[in-house]
Image (cartoon, rainbow, N blue to C red):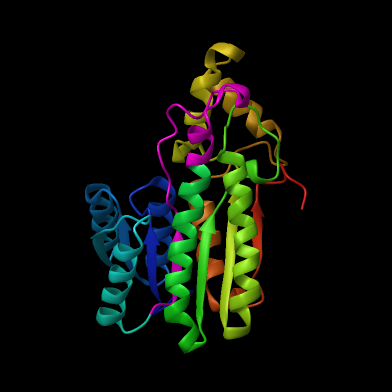
Amino acid sequence: MLLANKIAVIYGAGGAIGGAVARAFASEGARVFLSGRNLAPVEAVAKDIVSAGGLADTAEVDALDERAVDEHLQSVIDTAGRLDISFDAVGFPNAGILGVPLVDLGVEQFALPITTHATSYFLTARLAARRMVPRRSGVIMTVTAQHSRMGIPLVGGYGPAQALKESLTRHLSAELAPHGVRVVGLRPAAMPESGTIKDAFEPRRELTEMTWVQFQELLASRTHPKRLMTLAEMANAAAFLASDRAAGLTGTTVNLTLGALDD
């Protein structure tokens, strides 16, 4: 198995992306420590993993709270002895942000996704690195979206937030890779199962007069295989990137847009 005996922490594990990554990591042999602001969905993911024969622990952790993240990581170290993988899949509600033209968007609304994503990724990465550097081993990961590289209307600060995370991945790697810690990201195409493109579609429904099916078909038409990515495909790629077989990858965000974006 790709991640046999690895110790992984997943932030935002109760969400669709975090949950899929947690299941993939566990199926490849990792012991996963799942966290989120709301414990119920995190425990549901853990139940699935344990039912499938995997190892999963849960905790209620606000990834924007430095003390909470630090204390949780220390509990992981105390329990498992080390930290091998840190994966940030933290999200936030899009209501009042998506669907609003930039010229009509308030400064606080624009800044919210930027500060939320930047803070969670920076805190979780920095605190994980402090545990990984002494061992000269570890992988820090996050997930972004094609908004980081494309000008897309009506997404507020979401696109700049994704671009910031990809830049932070490069800067973290420049400092941490010499100490044996890799930093990598994934940039998947729209995944209907995640609900993210559903959030993007709703404010466009009246403007475009498209149906949900037509909207998915439009997005799929931009990819090479003319389909959208699945959560399983994204999560399997994450498991590979977290493994020792991807040792040559750091300081980069892997393009999983099925050809919709050129490298």
Quick one: quadrant of the N terminus? Answer: bottom left
126 versus 21 height, above or below:
below
Q: Is residue 234 left or right of residue 53?
A: right
Q: Which residues are magenta?
A: 83-112
Q: Is residue 202 left or right of residue 165?
A: left
Q: Residue at x 39, y 77 (%)?
A: 83
Give the quarter of the image for residue 63: bottom left
Residue 129 lies within the magenta run: no
Q: Residue at x 31, y 59 (%)?
A: 35
Give x and y (percent) for residue 89.
44, 54
| Residue projecting furthest to the front | 107
| Residue projecting furthest to the bottom | 135
Give the quarter of the image for residue 71: bottom left
Q: Residue at x 63, y 83 (%)?
A: 178
Give x and y (percent) for residue 14.
33, 50
245 versus 11 height, above or below:
below
